[in-house]
Image (tube, rainbow, N blue to C red):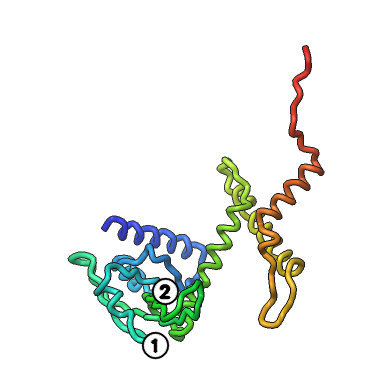
Amino acid sequence: MKKYYTNVAIITYLLDKINSLNLKIKRLYLDRGFYSSSVIRWLIALDIPFIMPAVRNGKAGGINQYLKGKKSYRTNHTMNQGSYNEITFDLCIICRYRKGKRGKHGIEYLAYVVYKVDINLDYISEDYRKRFGIETSYRLKNICRIRTTSKNPIIRLLFVGISFLLVNIWIYILWFKISKPRRGGRLVYNHLFSLKQMLAFLSNAVNRIYQVREIIYIPDI
């Protein structure tokens, strides 16, 4: 149970930081690692709209009992993780047809805990996928982030800003220079020009401009 209460503490800390910036949360997207009765109860008590994937454990019962049928639907589920950790919440079961994607066919079931989110069932999974765009941006940012041991927050924030700028430059080049329009959507040749390749080009250019030394000769005495 410690893990669940730690997650509550993490959420509380982050929400406090957000409130201090006078920002309003329109919708909260949580990782499946936060799926627990303690977290769900706390978010409902705070009246914060959220979407969270439900964890499917075991072969029968639990969330698995709802994975049936051919249409998406809403239901209620009661989770019990201890004497005082029972919570009933809205559960959305999404049915999607794979249509041969990744070599798979048939129905794929997705389960989400949803609270005060006014959105059509057919769009819940697509709406939740927005968070992956944020995670992808941060992963790309980490590829080109300048490493430093400085504790100066201004310098560290500057390096983060530069890394995001580099990512955006790469995306711009891909979209406008290394792609071509076609019916059904623009064809982007991202495999021909990766972010790491652009960083290598920049590194080589810096080396040429500033004549970086690669060999040091020790003078004869």
Disc on the earlier residue, 1 or 2 = 2
Judge from the rendering whether residue 20 lies leftward or rightward of residue 178; answer left or right.
left
Residue marked by disc 2: 51
Judge from the rendering whether residue 206 lies leftward or rightward of residue 89; answer left or right.
right
Q: Residues within 10 Å of mark 1 (few under 14, many from 20)?
A: few
Q: Quadrant of residue 171?
A: bottom right
Task: Report x, y in % for residue 74.
Answer: 35, 84
* Residue that appears at 60% across and 53% down: 143
Residue 199, compared with residue 44, is above or below; it is above
Assign a secondary structure to mark 1. Answer: loop
Q: Residue furthest left?
A: 83
Depth order, front residue of 84/213 = 213
Judge from the rendering whether residue 9 lies leftward or rightward of residue 82; answer left or right.
right
Query: Is the C-beta separation of discs 1 and 2 under 8 Å?
Result: no
Task: Report x, y in % for residue 32.
Answer: 39, 66
Task: Report x, y in % for residue 64.
Answer: 30, 75
Q: Quadrant of residue 3?
A: bottom left
Assign a secondary structure to mark 2. Answer: strand
The quadrant in which the N terminus is found is bottom left
Q: Residue furthest top?
A: 221
Q: Which mark is residue 71?
A: 1
